[in-house]
Amino acid sequence: MEFSIKRKASEKQRSGCVVIGVFETRKFAAGADSFGKDTQRSISEILARGDMDGKAGTTLLLHNVSALPAERLLIVGLGKEKEFHDKEYCAAIRTAVKTLNDTGTPDATLLLTQIPVKKRSVAWRIRQAAMVASEALYRFDRFKSKKEAPRPLDRLIFSIDEKVKEAQAAQALEQGLAIAEGVALARTLGNLPGNVCTPTHLAETALLMSHDHSLECRILEQPDMEALGMHSLLSVTKGSHQPPKLIVVHYKGGKTGDKPVVLVGKGITFDTGGISLKPGEGMDEMKFDMCGAASVLGTLKAVALMKLPINLTVIVPSVENMPGGAASKPGDIVTSLSGQTIEILNTDAEGRLILCDALTYAERFNPKAVIDVATLTGACVIALGHVATGLFANDDELAGELLGAGAVAADRAWQMPLWDDYQEQLKSNFADMANIGGRPAGSVTAACFLSRFAGKFAWAHLDIAGTAWKSGAEKGATGRPVPLLVHFLLERAGKLH
């Protein structure tokens, strides 16, 4: 798909289709005022007949509109003008692109990008349009013998008015497309089945990306981790025939000596629960338990494509959690890389066992901040559903940055408590701590467990169990929270407008 920006008046713009917006009052949105009088009159007459009421999500496709050089005109309903905000703007772009993809037009010009959105810049509108359009066009049919016929739509033009600085809009488009590529990588890795996307496959993906973008990459194998003392991480992989990997990638776009931001992504490529076996129903979705890993790799790709002036390190502890004669058992005690001992009361609480060693490993990079991303707890789904990512942090400033980035990116998070009161639930009679704290506040006690390994740096934990994938008819990885993470890094790099 080719994307571009143009500020030509729409009546002069030849295109397979022009897209405008209409509010519920049948009032044209910004952009349509550049049509000639004959065109405006013709469209108004059609609207007056009641063919389009402007309700959000509705569309009307017209052919050969008077004095309009485009073959088609697509009108998208925007809903009530006073209620048109971030969510409604993104929904309008998504509706337009999906409809365009079914019309047979090879190219289209979107005037929707001229519509003002309260408290949002032109750059935000362009960036979001690129992200949403790419998401709407994403397909995953790698394993289907009969693939969908390629859609004819291969070019989208985002229209801007004469007052907008074209360079700023072009940079926003570049950013949006880079984020979209990162999201697509995360979605594709998440959608791959567990027999393909193994820890080795994740390592090979990181190595290939490092080659393509001149990054530094090191893959630690099982003997390396044993020598280091990562016995908590290795306890999870004991029942699997797949070798574990600790993937470490460095992007050095900032000044030499600048402390890096470190992203840690949970990479359980398939999670049966181990000896604490999960119910069979829906277990296929446990291939998505590596979406934390997928999202940090997707974020890394977006950062590399944009060449952001920051230093970034990505760490992916990756294993498969399987039952077997050698698998860890409830009641086993292991020693983590930090030296702290852990009583494993439930082998299905395995994500924290690999993350804790990865967090300790991150200390050696003298990080500016560490953010771990994990499909960690079903309890977070109960607390927040599938709308917001759970955010826990030991640093309020870092938490505020991430919350702000999520709001701007339309990839929201919600801060949860990380109070010492909850630490009591992790007490063990036989080790320094247990790996679970019981059913009450399950997502909080999981974060409290991780916090015991993050005391030497500013740290945040993103629990994406409810946002990393969808079930049902739209089953598949979402790519979240790549947009949140990239917007956070854009802001830190001073490149967000």
Image (spheres, rainbow, N blue to C red):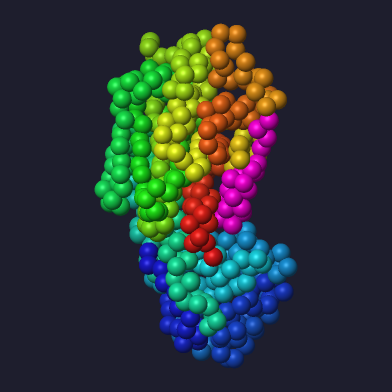
Q: Position of residue 424 (x, y in %)?
A: 67, 19
Residue 398 visible in this rendered orientation of the protein: yes
Q: Give above or below for 262 relative to 235.
A: below
Residue at left 50%, top 18%? 340
Q: Is residue 132 visible?
A: no
Q: Quadrant of residue 378?
A: top right
Q: Quadrant of residue 497?
A: bottom right
Q: 256 or 104, which lies in front?
A: 256
Query: What residue occupies the far left of the structure in this picture?
Result: 211
User: Which residue is found at the position 49% from the left and 44% from the top?
Assistant: 368
Q: Is residue 409 magenta?
A: yes
Residue at the spot x=31%, y=41% of the render?
Answer: 217
Quadrant in the picture for the N terminus: bottom left
Q: Can you give x and y, in whole percent of width and height, for residue 376 in the image?
A: 54, 31
Numbered range of the magenta stretch: 396-419
Question: In x, y percent, where is residue 444?
Answer: 64, 30
Is residue 460 rendered magenta in the image?
A: no
Estimate the x, y position of residue 492 in percent, counting from the top left.
51, 54
